Amino acid sequence: MKTIRTRTLLLVVLAAAAPGATACQGEPQPLAPAATELKAPEAKAPAAAAFAIDRAGSKVELAMDAPREKIRGRIEGAAGGTLQVDPADITKTTGLITVDLSTLELFQTAVGDDGKPGEEKKSDVQNEHARTWLEISKDTPDDVREKNAKAQFAIRSISTSGEKDLSKLSGAERTVTVTASGDLLLHQRQTPKTVELIATFRYEGDRPAGVTVKTAKPFSVGLAEHDVRPREAFGKLAQKTLEVLAPKVAKEAMVSLE
């Protein structure tokens, strides 16, 4: 099985909005269908080659703008999965990417009265808040935490306006831009998702030996439909915390992979 170098960047841009953000005329946005796990789609071509994501080399990062502060997060060595790629027709590509959220770390940079950012610091409280929103905190029951500890993207179809056959391209690195359609799983909620990707295949002779994948542009993830929001910690009354964090929750996040 060949290897995918991800150098994954998960960029999340959150604008200020109240929790329970409404979709239209004050009505709450409906939750996406419930799901606990996505299955890897079957290969569409007998000649498809399996490319395994290099988990150790993967990196997930996020950025959030909140009132008076900027928040940066990271998850290293957390992305895994496999892509099934037919070099003769990349539109037959399928795959499943899984990101382990349990090692998420957040860092804060406060913005002063002069509008200038201060020193970046890690806040244990902020980290615990984020895990509570996602229901992966230490206070979350084990069975609930296990179900919420991963985000997945199942690639079910690929389209491109460019070359589909990699053999018709030349060079040791061959780059294609594609549109990947499939399903996103986050916080036990499944939504259809379409993402523009740039894939660069590294060739050794006439055969692909590896591939690096990144997004061509960010794609949106609706937080409300995935029920990602400030909530009470299990076993605690955290009303004051909820009141403080409420303005920081946004309607959607913009996500990129690099």
Image (cartoon, rainbow, N blue to C red):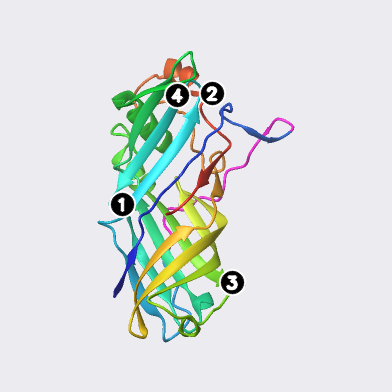
Residue 247 drawn at (x, y percent):
54, 23
Outermost residue, front direction?
Answer: 171
Residue type marked 3: Thr
In contact (CB < 8 Å): disc 4 and disc 3: no
Q: Which residue is labeled 1 in the image? A: 78
Q: Label 2, label 1: how many angstroms apart (C-alpha)?
A: 29 Å
Main SS of the magenta part reads: loop
Residue type marked 1: Ala
Which sits earlier in the primary sequence, circle 4 or circle 2?
Answer: 4
Q: Which residue is labeled 2 in the image? A: 247
Near mark 1 (Cα within 10 A), the count class, few <14, some 14-19 or many ≥20, is many
Which sits earlier in the primary sequence, circle 3 or circle 1?
Answer: 1
Towards the viewer: 145 or 78 = 78
Residue 164 drawn at (x, y percent):
54, 79
Identify the residue at image location x=44%, y=77%. Answer: 43
Identify the residue at image location x=33%, y=50%. Answer: 59
Which sits earlier in the primary sequence, circle 3 or circle 2?
Answer: 3
The range drawn in magenta is 25-38
* Quadrant of the image containing the N terminus: bottom left
Identify the residue at image location x=41%, y=21%. Answer: 110
Q: Label 3, label 2: how many angstroms apart (C-alpha)?
A: 40 Å
Which sits earlier in the primary sequence, circle 4 or circle 3?
Answer: 4
User: Could you tell me if residue 130 is visible in this image?
Assistant: yes
Q: Label 3, label 1: how many angstroms apart (C-alpha)?
A: 28 Å
Q: Is residue 35 in the magenta section?
A: yes
